[in-house]
Structures are given as C-alpha cells and as structure tokens.
Image (cartoon, grey):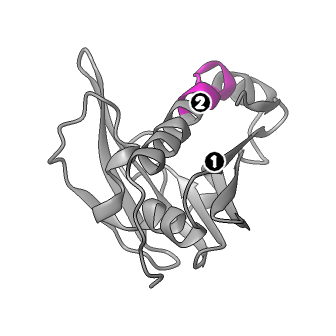
Amino acid sequence: MTPTPHPERGFTLTRLLDAPRDVVFRAWTDPAHLQWFFSNHTPADEPIDVDLRVGGQWRQRMVIGDGNEYITGGVYLAIDPVERLVFAWGAVDGWPTVQPDRTDDAPIVTITLTESGSQTHMLFELRLPDHDSDEQLREWMASGISAGWSATIDRLVDHLAENPVSVKPR
C-alpha cells in the first residue's frame, strides 16, 4: 500500500498481515523474531537488543549497502501486549538520534494491532515532533522516511506470509 502522507507532521501505513496479532506483536518485540526488520544487506547473525519495558530500548544495526549503515531502534513509551506499541524512533548514537530522556525530540511511532479473523490489521503511524519547524518537517519527509518505513513494513508482511508461526503471547 502507498503511505498516506500528512506532510504537516508524519504519515500512516496500513497492512493486513497473514498472522494472528500475538505473532505480529512478537515480531515487533522479540529479538528472536525481529530479523525481518533488517535490510537485505545486513548480516543474518547481526545482534538485536530489546529491553521491552517502558523506557527500555530496542537497538539494531541496519546495513543499506555501499558503506551506508547505522544503528536504529527506539525507546519504548507504551506497551500494550498484542494491541499497541509506541516508541520514540531512533537510537543513542544512531539514526535518527534519540536520547532516552528527550523522546519529545524524536519521531514517535504508534503501532496498533486489530484482529481480523486469523489475520491482523496493522496501523502504523509516525508523527514528527510538534516543535519541529516547517523546514525540519520538509527535511524529514525529503529524507525518504515514508518510503523506507513502507519497505520495512513490506518485509514484515512477506516474512509473516512465508513463515507462519503460532507463538504464545508473553
């Protein structure tokens, strides 16, 4: 699906995933199930760190190719198991940069999961900081974040379609 642009502050992506929502939630929060997030250039054995608690951090290295690599992840702001996940997108010393004590300076991602039979409807919302200037908002949107997140979410869709797994909720 094409992202719905909201150039004033962010964008929304929706997907129907071929998995129950507990599996989708785990795909977002369990390091053993987060490999789908990597680009095709990231080594398969690259470690992923997840401290799944409000204030905890998720970190992983992305390799885009041609020497372009960075640490990314998030700082968890809200965790409602199998229903909703909210995080400040970025990493300390990563891209985008986020400081755990200044999450209001980071883009905020909200993932909402709704059951749809044996599938899950996922709503992905990215909101840019309220205090960013118009120029900063244009720079964010020009950086390709909506296309990047759309491609990342498509990897999740493909991963779940190719790897149907029944996972017990935590």
User: What residue is at 63 percent from the left and 47 percent from the top?
Assistant: 107
Q: Which residue is mark 2?
A: 145
Q: Is residue 114 above or below residue 74?
A: below
As measured in the structure, the alpha-carbon distance from the residue carrying label 2 to the one carrying label 1 is 11 Å
Viewer-nearest residue: 37 or 115: 115
Residue 100: in sight, yes or no?
no
Q: Magenta: predominant secondary structure element?
A: helix
Quadrant where the N terminus is found in the figure = top right
Neighbours of disc 2 within 10 Å: few (<14), some (14-19), many (20+): some
Quadrant where the C terminus is found in the figure = bottom left
Residue 107: mark in rendering: 1
Residue 20: x percent and y percent? 57, 66
Neighbours of disc 1 within 10 Å: few (<14), some (14-19), many (20+): many
Q: Which residues are magenta?
A: 140-148
Q: What amino acid type is highlighted by mark number 2?
A: Ile
Q: Are marks 2 and 1 in contact (CB under 8 Å)?
A: yes
Query: In the rendered view, does 117 fall on the left or right side of 7?
Result: left
List the single residue furthest toward the left: 45
User: What residue is at 34 percent from the left and 60 percent from the top?
Assistant: 33
Query: In the rendered view, does 35 fall on the left or right side of 77?
Result: left
User: What residue is at 25 percent from the left and 14 percent from the top?
Assistant: 66
Q: What amino acid type is highlighted by mark number 1?
A: Pro
Viewer-nearest residue: 45 or 161: 161
Residue 150: x percent and y percent? 59, 33
Q: Is residue 71 above or below residue 6?
A: below
Disc 2 on helix, strand or loop?
Answer: helix
Q: Earlier in the sequence, mark 2 or mark 1?
A: 1
Disc 1 on helix, strand or loop?
Answer: loop
